[in-house]
Amino acid sequence: MDTPSPSPPSGSGNVNEIPASGSVSNPLFFGPPWGGTALSGCLMAGELNSTWIAFTVATAGSLQFAFGAGGQQQGFYDWAMWPLTGAATCTAIRNNIQAPVRCVWNATTLGGTGLANTPPPGGDPGNYAPALPVNAGDRFIICFSNWSFINAMVTLDFFGSADIQCGTVMPVELLWVTAKVEDAHVNVDWATGSEHNSDHFEVLRSGDGSTWEAIGMVTAAGDTWSTTEYHYIDELPLPGLDHYRIREVDVDGSSQESDVVTVNVNHPSDVRISPQPNEGRFVVTGLEANGLTLIDGTGREVGMDIAQGPWQASISVAMEQPAPGIYFLHHSSTGRAFRVVVKRSL
């Protein structure tokens, strides 16, 4: 199979997707642990101008491939390959707990680079690691690092006895997801290694880690072989622990979800809700009654009666049909939300 892949000319990105050289996910060695004559590695200069590529093995055999063989190579094309089991693999690589199965730090800028027991014509043994025995269904992800800042199309050729699933392009591979509190909002960021037929991303949020709601949508790139980074701002995070994950939706409606990331949002406040928990009746101090709505865990508004509270600057709230669960009291005037815990009546 021949797959053309763009080699980006410059730019290392805003996030280091690969740990430093000499780590678990990016080991440093002189003489590969799996044999061969590749110089050393893996990505000794880190991840520069990277392209992420994922593929699935169709039939068992010897996995062999080459980037830029046949005179295409114009610079140093360093790379590393890890077994791929899902979105968690990319998180494990970034968190430095997933070791590669093969990698090459190029010895020369000629003849291509890859896996081969016998390098293709013009290939240098120092640019090739030994072939890898694989089984049908095995999946792998490669970080291809354009160390030399070359702007070119690089062909990926598979020529071993193992066949690759050429008819099915790998779906979107989520590399990482982060959430960070900044002032009164939360920045949610994520990145993909490649995308095929992706339509959009949904940002999901949960206050308890089990009930989720979609709070935003970001248009996807569609089809790309390059790393793509995305950003979303949650302007009205919930007080306390906020859990986030990303749902990627393809054009055919199929979807996949990322790992969960959690932040703690502390809103300094003189607002009080008591008692907590309660049986659907509670008193709120520090908020005006105008603009208050009560929302359940599915995002639906819940009916309630509001009256003057027992003391100054307080209001009494009685739910029309109280049911056990976690609710959120939203105040439109300030844009803030407050957690309300309702327990089962005795």
Image: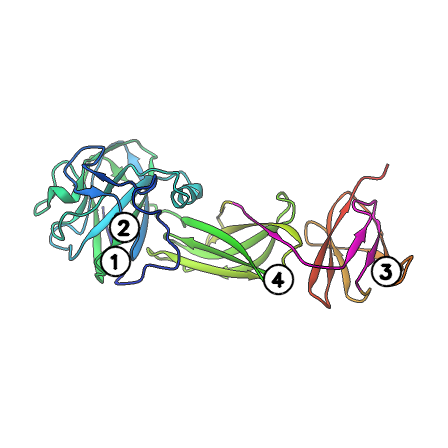
Question: Which residue in the protein does label 4 denote?
Answer: 184
Q: Measure the alpha-carbon separation of dots 1 and 3.
A: 63 Å
Which badge, 2 or 4, comes first in the chain's sequence?
2
Residue 340, given in percent of the width and then of the height, sits at 75, 50
Mark 2 sits on what residue? 144
Label 2, secondary structure: give it.
strand
Find out whether the residues at labels 2 and 3 contact each other: C-beta distance under 8 Å.
no
**Label 2 packing within 10 angstroms: few (<14), some (14-19), many (20+):** many
SS label for mark 3: strand
Q: Please tell me whether residue 292 belongs to the stretch shown in magenta.
A: no
Q: Do residues under tags 2 and 1 come within 8 Å of each other at their CB atoms?
A: yes
Q: Which residues are magenta?
A: 260-287
Q: Which residue is mark 3?
A: 314
Question: Looking at the picture, how far across and down is residue 277, in whole percent?
Answer: 79, 44
Which amino acid type corresponds to the residue marked 3 in the rendered image? Ser
First reached walking from the N terminus: tag 1 or tag 3: 1
Farthest residue to the left: give it. 122
Q: Depth-wise, is mark 2 or mark 4 nearer the camera?
A: 4
- Type of amino acid at the residue the image marks with label 2: Phe
Q: Which residue is mark 1?
A: 7
- Quadrant position of residue 293: bottom right
Mark 4 / mark 3, whichever is N-terminal:
4
Residue 8 relative to residue 179: left or right: left
Indicate whether residue 262 is drawn in magenta.
yes
Q: CA distance from mark 2 to mark 3?
A: 61 Å
Marks 2/4: CA–CA distance: 38 Å
Residue drawn at (41%, 60%) of the image: 221
Viewer-nearest of discs 1 and 4: 4
Mark 3: give few (<14), some (14-19) or many (20+) Cα within 10 Å: many
Closer to us: 313 or 36? 313
